[in-house]
Image (cartoon, rainbow, N blue to C red):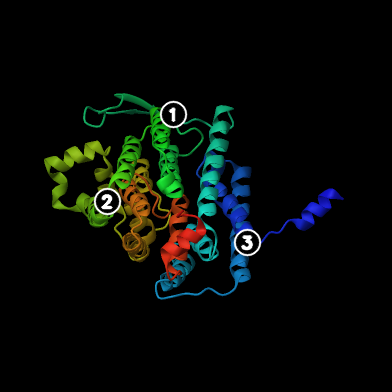
């Protein structure tokens, strides 16, 4: 009787339902990046539960009712239409639809709670996979990699990189980097120096086992930039906005143009290619086999070396797999986010976007579950007449 009374008093409103569904869907996406997705039964369970959650969020959109779109919110209407067209007629992927459903159904969701929910789902997913590898359900997948004198600076010359149950040894380092960024985004001015020390030490331990030199360097860069906010916020915002735009252009040039340009054979590019473990060369091979098209190739089948790079460079993955139209939409989105962060003097969001732009040189997180909260934040912020007022009401600002 007592249990029955408690159940009657439990109120699951749209916000609570969204948070529960969101946690389960992000957890599903994390597990889908593990070797569980390569086991028949668990792979089927992941797919079935994914479709169930997709239907759940579709119903939630209709349950919430009207959405007050303004001109900038129109961006998401265009995005949803193009995503549906690509999925139906070309080489679209379900991830676009998942992101659209999560973004639209998030209207009026408390952002602080959502980011904490996202962090919890990432942590729980990683713990499940890593523990599964420790007890022998999944393989640790140790990969031996030798670094030369250029790429081995600060690090061991010989390195075994462990995936600990995931399909790629970069997944845990990238997750560690973004967890650090999300905690900064949540805590903002209340973030303590002690947290930086813990974050750097934990990510360095991850590096020792999983590798990914660029990730540990990005963690260090994040700590430095965060202290730039602490000591000189106004100048930080002023300098980082043009810097982000320049870095974004540079990353696009590095990923899409440099490998097929005449600069490719120059000595300096050869050195850069060695630092980035032949990424420029592999991109060149990928683009020679799969030139960038309007709608992309979807999940292309390549040899191992090419496939490695497609997965490990967000810009080439975006334009080769999804095509020019979707690629441009996401680049425009990044520019919009930079502009809105500047307009609202949001130094912490600028910090997040900066690391996200640079990080996609070595990983694919532009169109990825790990960055979903940024798109959701954009959607809800763009629909608000005053973005900072919305963020304060959501608990993002104190």
Residue at 29% x, 24% y is: 157
Say whether marks 1 and 2 touch (CB < 8 Å): no
Q: Is residue 209 above or below residue 338?
A: above
Judge the density around disc 3: few (<14), some (14-19), many (≥20) Cα neighbours within 10 Å. some
Residue 180: % across, % down:
42, 42
Residue 21, by quadrant, is: bottom right
Relative to residue 273, is residue 225 drawn left or right? right
Say whether marks 3 and 2 touch (CB < 8 Å): no
Q: Secondary structure at mark 2?
A: helix
The residue at the far right in this view is 1
* Mark sitting on residue 236: 2
* Mark sitting on residue 12: none
Question: Mark 3 or 2, which is nearer the eye?
Answer: 2
Residue at 55% x, 36% y is: 127
Relative to residue 275, is residue 223 drawn left or right? right
According to the image, label 3 marks what residue? 56
Residue 7, by quadrant, is: bottom right
* Mark sitting on residue 142: 1
């Amino acid at each position: 009787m007592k249990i029955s009374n408690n159940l009657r008093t439990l109120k699951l409103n749209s916000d609570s339902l969204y948070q529960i569904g969101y946690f389960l869907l992000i957890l599903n996406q994390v597990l889908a990046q593990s070797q569980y997705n390569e086991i028949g039964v668990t792979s089927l369970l992941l797919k079935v539960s994914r479709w169930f959650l997709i239907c759940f969020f579709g119903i939630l959109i209709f349950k919430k009712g009207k959405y007050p779109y303004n001109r900038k919110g129109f961006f998401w209407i265009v995005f949803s239409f193009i995503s549906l067209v690509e999925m139906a007629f070309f080489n679209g992927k379900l991830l676009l639809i998942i992101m659209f459903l999560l973004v639209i159904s998030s209207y009026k969701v408390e952002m602080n709670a959502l980011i904490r929910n996202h962090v919890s789902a990432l942590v729980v997913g990683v713990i499940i996979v890593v523990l599964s590898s420790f007890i022998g359900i999944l393989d640790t997948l140790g990969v031996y990699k030798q670094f030369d004198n250029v790429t081995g600076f600060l690090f061991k010359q010989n390195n075994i990189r462990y995936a600990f149950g995931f399909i790629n040894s970069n997944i845990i380092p990238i997750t560690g980097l973004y967890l650090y960024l999300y905690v900064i985004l949540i805590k903002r001015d209340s973030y303590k120096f002690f947290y930086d020390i813990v974050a750097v030490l934990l990510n360095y331990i991850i590096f020792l086992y999983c590798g990914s030199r660029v990730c540990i360097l990005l963690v260090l860069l994040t700590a430095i930039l965060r202290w730039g906010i602490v000591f000189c916020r106004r100048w930080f915002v002023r300098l980082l906005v043009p810097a982000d735009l320049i870095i974004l252009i540079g990353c696009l040039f590095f990923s899409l143009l440099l490998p097929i340009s005449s600069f490719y054979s120059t000595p300096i590019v050869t050195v850069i290619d060695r630092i980035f473990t032949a990424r420029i060369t592999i991109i060149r091979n990928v683009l020679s086999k799969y030139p960038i098209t309007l709608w992309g190739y979807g999940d292309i089948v390549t040899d191992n070396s090419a496939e490695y790079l497609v997965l490990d460079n967000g810009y080439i993955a975006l334009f080769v797999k999804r095509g020019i139209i979707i690629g441009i939409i996401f680049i425009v989105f990044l520019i919009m986010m930079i502009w809105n962060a500047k307009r609202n003097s949001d130094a912490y969001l600028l910090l997040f976007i900066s690391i996200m732009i640079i990080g996609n040189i070595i990983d694919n997180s532009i169109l990825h579950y790990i960055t979903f909260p940024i798109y959701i934040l954009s959607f809800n912020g763009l629909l608000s007449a005053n973005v900072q007022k919305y963020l304060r009401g959501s608990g993002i600002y104190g």
